[in-house]
Image (cartoon, rainbow, N blue to C red):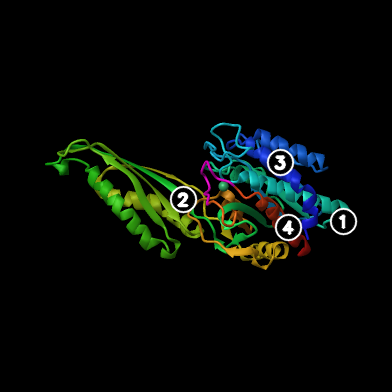
Amino acid sequence: MVGPWLEEILPELIEFRRDLHAHPELSFKEFRTTDKLVERLEAAGLKPRRLEGTGLTVDVGEGPITTALRGDIDALPIIEETGLPFASKNHGVTHACGHDVHTTTMLGVALVLHGMHRVRPLGGTVRIIFQPAEETMPGGALSCIEQGVLEGVPRIMALHCDPRINVGQIGTRIGAITSASDTIKIELTGRGGHTSRPHLTEDLVFALSQIAVNVPAVLSRRVDVRSGVSVVWGQISAGSAPNAIPASGYMAGTMRCLDRDAWHDAGELLDDVVREIAAPYGVEVHLEHTRGVPPVVNSEDETAIIEAAARAELGEHAVVLTPQSMGGEDFAWFLADIPGAMMRLGTHTPGGEEYDLHRGDFIVDERALGYAVQVLAAAALRTIRDL
Ligand code: NI
């Protein structure tokens, strides 16, 4: 049981989290946060490794790595409106996505496991990754991976606050738990002219309309419909007079997808589909397709490890099923080559106010912090036991 180990450091963790909350930092600018973590981990006798710029990793235990745990450390450019005594002192920046809780959870797990290891060797190593810049595109996950944080790591686990789940519970789901979202921008150029003589022009208004209607149609027939690929245009503009065909036009939209393979397939197809639809009209096509993140796909085994740990630590009713969110999360990049799972951490006070992420008034029930440490430390221990 992790509980007794946690009790000792919980008051300090609450203070640590409040301090982070009062000093939030934007993506790739988490210098103070990184320094605080390094300082505390070194004071415990651990040897954290700083990543380029911001972020760090730390290995706890000895021998082969049995799992990595990842916590994201950045805040959002949102004005805080909670009125909390430890509200943001960095005006315009807020931990409105709960990453202060994620960061402190991972610090807590490191301290708990290290405390245990000093009494009796763990028999394996747990790598903790404090990842910068989850809130930007492309997120900090890719730069962490480029710096080798996954070398020798067989699996990875993570958490995200969820204000729709009661504190004391966690949400899990096997398969995709977040979604992919890409941005598509298309510019068409061609010879404009009089609408009475479209054959002497390259009628890009007509071509834009064809793209608007037919790209979603073709993708719905070429990509598995169960993947929910959805192309929706948010912008379309061209022309300035009813009787003149313009020389340029623009449209932009998003492509969302529930499934990783389909996201890949749809992305590969997109360029060809747009060009083939536009080809008969002779217009010039400039396509900008920005890949967001793939969905986070939770593996069966790692989800089971988290669920078993949660039930053992927090009780039989601690695990609830969570729906797939349409939001994106760059933890997905860690899962490209190794299995893993992300759990939702309940932060809602039963009977209390309803909050949502990415809002200035977002408040977390602080008890969630201790529960998160318990569950993830216990889950990490289970991966060592299974060595
Ligand atoms: Ni977040």
Point 29% across, 53% down: residue: 213
Residue 26 picture location, percent across and down: 58, 36
Lower sequence index among marks 2 and 4: 2
Q: Residue furthest right?
A: 119
Lower sequence index among marks 1 and 2: 1
Q: Which residues are magenta?
A: 354-363
Measure the C-alpha gap from mark 1 to mark 2. Answer: 46 Å
The 10 Å Cα crowd at callout 1, few under 14, some 14 to 19, many 20 or more, is: few
Residue 18 picture location, percent across and down: 67, 40
Residue that badge 1 annotates: 120
Name the mark nearer the viewer: 1 or 3.
3
Give the number of marks.
Answer: 4
From the Cβ of disc 4, is ligand 1 less than 8 Å away?
no
Numbered badge on residue 380: 4
Name the mark nearer the viewer: 2 or 3.
3
The 10 Å Cα crowd at callout 4, few under 14, some 14 to 19, many 20 or more, is: many
Lower sequence index among marks 2 and 3: 3
